[in-house]
């Protein structure tokens, strides 16, 4: 979604500008505190399931959540008691009536659904807690998992609702009489009044909607707010009951699960894609925000986001990228001979990066394309890191693909499976990989790619032993030097040894030396704050690092860490420039500079090749 950021922001801006002049409806006044809202306030916010946030207008202006709280408290009650226990107290049928109607099922006394007042009061009574204070504390904590930030109750609105909520109080006593509420109905009422008085803003609501769209996981914080099996149940009642007696019309025209509130808020959910929120206090006769409905109607129609509008599935929706090791190598830097061999024969290693949902509707199409494009590959890597969810048919197809490749003497590796517990369990049960099988050995795609490269190189007789010492003459930077020049250079190097995990170079330090790696392996790491590091390359014996620091005379741009016992030959900048006694002569320095330029040019060509492959 990042590539569409300008489009989405501009589109929200245009909707805001278009409907800002719409002044139909009136601010709710049956609760005195709500009548104080500014009628012209207007905000739109959108959050995608990959965590991008777009907003326009008064998106940070606080207002009370009101009935938008109902589906989220319903989800909490489902988690507390289970589906059947909650359904025994609250039905899931549309009422076709206004939100405050006394709509109870004949015979059982159950409220028609959890999104009308009767159902919401009953649901509030089902939340676990020995007192209204304990219940509302759990409600606030649950809501905060959706928003990603703590929330508070607007005390003035709460007291206003409590002092004027006589109809809701009558509903609660009818629920007590029918056995739906157990104990003091005032406790359920108090929880209900408080949850409706929780203060949010438009961005908060968009984040809550996006969490439902993301199968219960907050797309920014990564915190799970609702278990995956309950999300469809919450979205179902939102789709059929969320807009009160206008729910059928909403689903027919706009087609997204939604919920409105008399405070002027509205949320809409497009499962698997995004959450949308609108804030505008002017309401129509049914208690729904006028501008909010107009925004959602345009949004759904113009972007074809109706839930029942489905384009034909294609593998392009799931295959993020596909390439081979001839064009995209692993981050492990290798010598000229190994690199040349991988360029010639790297097509025997094929990589597919998948994204989105790998489900029954797409898995077979993807498997067919993988089969066609990897027909000649000896090694196949399928990366699932970007895949949000899978189902059993998808797991079955991966097991079939693994079995088919194994019968042909080929190897399949699955990466990015750390959070795919059900998929991994199914594969282990049905594919039964041996302990030395690489099928699930690697979490990171690059580690799997490096393993495949090593298998290919070993089969071709090219050594990949990390621990083997490589003489200076094997360095690519020394290939155009004669033996005498190599000996001269070797005599000028400062030999250093490092233990595994030891820092060789620190990001930001003034060290402009050139390092020749004579034995072992190092990793190049970039820092991203909070002590998080990302490995961008690994260099084995026979490689070098520090060329840019040497030439530019600037601080180190990355950390270099020894992965194994390491031996380095270090060429200090003063020796390179000839300032120190016995420094490089002009001829040797010129030849070494030519080698560095040639090596950097080769790396740029390889980067260009990788970019073309990944952009295809």
Image (cartoon, rainbow, N blue to C red):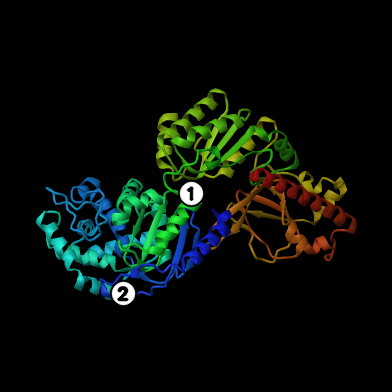
The image quadrant of residue 144 is bottom left
Q: Position of residue 38 (x, y in %)?
A: 38, 75
* Mark 1 nearby-residue class (10 Å; few <14, some 14–19, many ≥20): some
Q: Could you tell me if residue 437 is visible in this image?
A: no
The answer to which quarter of the image holds residue 338 is: top right
Q: Which residue is mark 2?
A: 35
Percent coordinates x, y for residue 46 in the rendering: 46, 59
Tell me, for residue 382, which label it has, or none: none
Which secondary structure, mark 1? loop
Q: Which residue is mark 1?
A: 304
Residue at the image point whose x is 44% and y is 60% from the top? 295
**Image quadrant where one finds the C terminus:** top right
Q: Depth check: 180 or 412 in front?
A: 180
| Figure disc tally | 2
> Which quadrant of the figure has residue 379?
top right
Which one is in front, 223 or 596? 223
Q: Considering depth in this image, is 198 or 15 the residue closer to the camera?
A: 15
For the point 42% across and 33% down, the residue is 393
Q: Secondary structure at mark 2?
A: helix
* Residue 162, x across and y down, in percent: 21, 71
Residue at figure coordinates x 22%, y 64% from the top left = 191
Going 65% across and 65% down the picture, which residue do you hit?
A: 508
């Amino acid at each position: 979604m990042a590539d569409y950021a300008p489009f989405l922001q501009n589109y929200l801006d245009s909707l805001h500008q278009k409907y800002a002049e719409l002044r139909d409806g009136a601010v709710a006044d049956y609760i005195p505190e709500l009548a104080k809202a500014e009628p012209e306030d207007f905000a739109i916010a959108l959050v995608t399931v990959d965590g991008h946030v777009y907003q326009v207008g008064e998106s940070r202006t606080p207002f009370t959540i009101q009935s938008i709280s109902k589906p989220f408290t319903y989800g909490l009650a489902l988690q507390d008691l289970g589906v059947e226990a909650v359904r025994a107290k609250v039905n899931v049928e549309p009422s076709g009536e206004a939100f405050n109607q006394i709509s109870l099922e004949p015979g059982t006394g159950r409220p028609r659904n959890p999104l009308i007042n009767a159902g919401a009061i009953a649901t509030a009574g089902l939340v676990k807690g020995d007192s209204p204070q304990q219940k509302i504390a759990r409600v606030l904590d649950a809501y905060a998992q959706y928003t990603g930030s703590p929330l508070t109750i607007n005390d003035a609105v709460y007291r206003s609702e409590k002092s004027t909520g006589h109809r809701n109080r009558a509903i609660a006593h009818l629920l007590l009489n029918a056995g739906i509420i157990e104990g003091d109905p005032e406790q359920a009422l108090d929880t209900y009044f408080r949850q409706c008085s929780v203060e949010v803003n438009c961005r908060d609501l968009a984040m809550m909607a996006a969490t439902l769209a993301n199968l219960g996981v907050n797309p920014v914080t990564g915190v799970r707010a609702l278990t995956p099996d309950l999300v469809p149940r919450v979205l179902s009642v939102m789709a059929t009951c969320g807009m009160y007696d206008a729910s059928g019309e909403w689903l027919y025209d706009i087609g997204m699960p939604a919920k409105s509130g008399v405070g002027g808020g509205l949320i809409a959910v497009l499962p698997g894609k995004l959450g949308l929120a609108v804030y505008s206090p002017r309401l129509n006769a049914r208690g729904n925000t006028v501008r909010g409905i107009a925004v959602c109607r345009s949004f759904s129609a113009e972007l074809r986001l109706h839930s029942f509008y489905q384009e034909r599935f294609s593998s392009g929706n799931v295959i993020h990228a596909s390439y081979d090791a001839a064009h995209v190598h692993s981050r492990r830097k290798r010598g000229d001979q190994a690199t040349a061999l991988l360029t010639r024969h790297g097509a025997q290693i094929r990589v597919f990066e998948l994204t989105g949902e790998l489900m029954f509707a797409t898995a077979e199409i993807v498997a067919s394309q993988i089969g066609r494009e990897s027909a000649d590959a000896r090694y196949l890597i399928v990366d699932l890191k970007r895949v949000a969810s899978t189902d059993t048919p998808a797991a079955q197809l991966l097991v079939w693909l693994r079995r088919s490749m194994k019968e042909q003497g080929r190897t399949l590796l699955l990466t990015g499976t750390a959070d795919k517990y059900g998929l991994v369990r199914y594969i282990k049960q049905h594919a039964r990989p041996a302990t030395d099988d690489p099928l699930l050995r690697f979490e990171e795609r690059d580690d799997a790619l490096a393993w495949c490269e090593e298998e290919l190189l070993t089969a071709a007789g090219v050594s990949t032993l990390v621990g083997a010492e490589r003489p200076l003459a094997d360095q690519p930077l020394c290939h155009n030097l004669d033996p005498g020049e190599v000996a001269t250079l070797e005599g000028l190097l400062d030999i250093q040894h490092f233990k595994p995990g030891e820092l060789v170079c620190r990001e930001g330090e003034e060290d402009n030396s050139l390092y020749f790696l004579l034995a072992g392996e190092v990793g190049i790491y970039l820092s991203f704050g909070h002590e998080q590091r990302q490995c961008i390359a690994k260099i084995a014996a026979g490689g070098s690092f520090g060329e840019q620091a040497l030439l530019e005379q600037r601080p180190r741009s990355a950390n270099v860490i020894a992965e194994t016992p390491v031996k380095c030959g270090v060429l200090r900048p003063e020796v390179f420039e000839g300032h120190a006694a016995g420094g490089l002569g002009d001829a040797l320095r010129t030849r070494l500079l030519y080698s560095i330029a040639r090596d950097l040019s080769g790396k740029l060509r390889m980067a260009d090749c990788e970019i073309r492959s990944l952009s295809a």
